[in-house]
Image: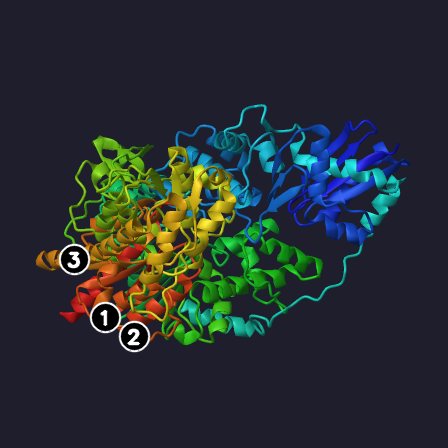
Amino acid sequence: MALRIGIDIGSTTVKVVVLDEQNKLLFRSYERHYSKARERTCETLRGLHGMLAGQKVQLLITGSAGLGVAKASGLDFVQEVYATAAAVRTFIPGTDAVIELGGEDAKIIFFGNTLEERMNGSCAGGTGAFIDQMATLLNVSVNELDELSLKHEKIYPIASRCGVFAKSDIQPILNQGGRKEDVAASIFQAVVDQTVAGLTQGRELKGKIVFLGGPLHFLMGLRERFVETLKLDSEHAVFPEDGDCFAAIGAALCTEDAPAQLFEEFLEKLEHAAGAPTIVDTMPPLFTDRADYEAFAARHSAMTVPTVDLSTYAGDAYLGIDAGSTTTKMVLIDPDCNILYSFYHSNQGNPVSIVLPQLKEIYAQCGDRVTIKGAAVTGYGEDLIKNAFSCDLGLVETVAHLNAARHFTPDVDFIIDIGGQDMKCFKIRNGAVDSILLNEACSSGCGSFIETFAKALGYNIADFSKMGLFAQNPVNLGSRCTVFMNSSVKQAQKDGASIEDISAGLSISVVKNAIYKVIRAANADDLGKHIVVQGGTFLNDAVLRSFEQEIGREVTRPTISGMMGAYGAALAAKAAGLEKSALLSPEALATFSHEARPSTCKGCTNRCSLTINKFDGGRRFISGNRCSVPLGQPKADIPDLLKFKYDYLRSLQGKGKGDGSRGRIGIPFGLNMYENLPFWFELFTSLNFEVVLSPESTRALYIKGQQTIPSDTVCYPAKLLHGHVMALLEEEVDAIFYPCMSYNFDEGMSDNHYNCPVVAYYPDLLNVNIPALSQVKYIHDNIGIHRPKDFAKKGAELLRREFGVPKREAAAAIRRAYAAYDDYRKLVRTKGEEYIQYARDNGRKILVIAGRPYHMDPEINHGINDLITSFGFVLVTEDAVFHHMDKQPRQVLNQWTYHARMYNAARYVCTQPDMAFIQLVSFGCGVDAITTDELRSILEEGGDLYTQLKIDDISNLGAVKIRIRSLMAALEARDNERK
């Protein structure tokens, strides 16, 4: 029998193994191929010449990138699932499931009567590439990340849905003093959650589980998180010694029917493989010639700020600090706004350690000649830096950027800031930030997007960016996920595109993503006439040129594009007009110390992840809180209708006015039950049932049902239902009642009154995906309480069929249920009027928060209501005010009850000068794509501000706080203008 060679060519690595007749492993290699898969494979095989020269061998190729190589070489290929299954069945019999993580893909294979595979689709979050990028964010190697994770004390919730965007969860933790050890373990936990929630798709992971692939082979911390999360013992968690090469071993095992040939013949086929000819899609060049570029460069270099030599300057100065998501910027200016000193550096996960030496350096250069009269700080790390170094003021970054943009273009009406891993766009109206757009779930249009490819191709970002300026045929790469764009780039390389063409194509891709995915602009006028671009990414001339070409308009890019936040903060410090700054003196800096430890607040169900920062002299700063309880102060006692409604609905459980003699009915407290619970509670307690509500939503409750969730893209409120039902099953209730409802109540404000498809039919989905429901009476009939006369008959029949309730008794209970629902709606309106009057009597602003009923759930809104009231707003919900407006035709199809409420509430806010409007949107909500643009249109036409807060299962509210503070600044500017 011939020796057998298995080759697994993955997205980032090549694995080669040689097996003998007894399946003994004679050789194995695991190498990165850096987009040159065939060349790397040939190099490894040439190294085997001494072992295999002149011998007949059998050979099979497998892997996600192996099919192309096999076709081009005329060699046999085996699908990787079958290869992996062959190896597992041979060496680890009795396996129930395989979890395999690769460089850019992740898969779960379930074993049974048939093989069933689940694989990641259009997002590479939670793969090896994700881990690589997170290590880069923390400024450590992957091995160091692994070592750090093993020393963790707590786990933070972090999204792994995007290989780059997880930074919106990680960065605030770091900027507020969180430990790298805890963040490292949290990154691995995010990979576990993404794998389990995203790939199991409703099927339970149990029995003997084998873990394969490079990340699970090399990273002990990742192994630990999987074992703990899945609650596996050593018998049921199997990590094979050669787990990184298992697919290659499987390919070798599958060669039994493959022809045997001389080793040299196989090698020759691989070495002389020809790729199939393809056509490269190209675009016009960015610049026609060097003169064109020089004219462009001269125009933009005119937008500069004079610098003054700090070593010879004497007088007053003002300091601005921008502790951004990934970098820290500092600018010192004189009274004429000239720059005396500037600094730009990666914050390396700890902005305090970056600012401290720079402050010492500034003081050293200033000597006795310069007096710092004011210091202001902005950015993600604003609160931490302000408290650490006693800065005089903090300002929201949107205002800081507006200050700086106005310095260059006084009539600016649109600012776009593209940083390393985030993108912010501000529309300016009447001199204030009117609306804010942020990249919500993907950062394929940010600076790190280009940097990732520059590194992968062996260039630094500066050199790589310049290469595209004079490319004659920029490649059209579209705009895709950072990780999946790899395949487009690799294909372009194979098709003969030069590095220059790829560099230009990536710059154009960044711009298209910004304009069409984040801003969603239909034309240049949607942006504005006086546009200022900033952020480090726009220092890339190729990106800037692409932007101007795409919108067909010249824009302003200051030469300090990457420093605008810090410069705007310095301008704010100057405008404060302080006589003396409270900034720590050189003597205080000499004894400065800082240490941080994590904690969890147990003051309420939010369970805020806190970071307790301790400074020299006993000073403390606590971050991560949404209210004042962790600070030792009582919560702000400001009316909050969201909380009132939630507390009222949670009270609707038990026997009510009945005696509970008919049994215990379990009701999952989620989705439309937040609207209809008063109806069902009255109905069942009137009939002497005891109503058992599922417990309050928590992260732990979500995890309880996580393995039964069939779709990773459904909204978080729907995912939570799985945990609620599992909890009710543990309560051993007599029945669980959760009906399908296509329609909501008709309030006469819309063209129809549907529930969204997820809300309407999720009870059926739960029935199919939670096997334990078959062991209990689960009532999920499709019913319609929107038609009282019809439901009086059909509801009575359902109650007779399921519980033997007499028709007359059921009819009376149904009448009481309708009355109870009407009373609840009146209560909400009455409370709303009471809270509005309180606000007006006490001179407070009123914030109308619009969303869906389930957005009152603290686990879903993450305590946003506490954050809002902490800023002094009285909070009212849209269902307390929408009735003030009559029905009006809309630009979109208005066929959902909750949509109509929001539209009317927005119209009402436009008539009330002391009200502002915020919309809550759950990440992944399809029907809210309709409401956002319509609400923006209503509010802008009414001269008001539209603010959207997008929320998902991650509780970090850094971006939320920015939007609320920006709204406050805009309201203040609007009020000043009205005066």
Tell me residue 925's x, y (percent).
Answer: 42, 57
Q: Which residue is mark 2?
A: 888
Query: Disc 3 and disc 2: Cα gap in Å?
Result: 24 Å
Mark 1 burial class by Cα count in 10 Å: few <14, some 14-19, many 20+ = some
Q: Which quarter of the rendering shows the C terminus? A: bottom left
Comparing 972 with 42, the one in front is 972
Residue for point 64% across, 31% down = 95
Comparing 630 with 351, the one in front is 630
Query: Disc 3 and disc 1: Cα gap in Å?
Result: 16 Å
User: Dot 3 lies on which element?
Assistant: helix
Reading the chain from its start, which is encountered first: label 3 or label 1?
3
Tell me residue 771's x, y (percent).
Answer: 51, 40
Mark 3 burial class by Cα count in 10 Å: few <14, some 14-19, many 20+ = some
Query: Disc 2 and disc 1: Cα gap in Å?
Result: 9 Å
Q: Which quadrant would residue 730 be assigned to in this image?
A: top left
Asked whether the viewer can see residue 570, the reply is no
Reading the chain from its start, which is encountered first: label 3 or label 2?
3
User: Dot 1 lies on which element?
Assistant: loop
* Circle 3: residue type: Thr
Tell me residue 772's x, y (percent).
Answer: 48, 37
Residue for point 26% across, 60% down = 878
Q: Which mark is residue 461?
A: none
Comparing 778 with 79, the one in front is 778
Asked if residue 705 is positioned above or below residue 433 in the image, the reply reads: above
Q: Which residue is mark 1?
A: 885
Q: Which mark is residue 830?
A: 3
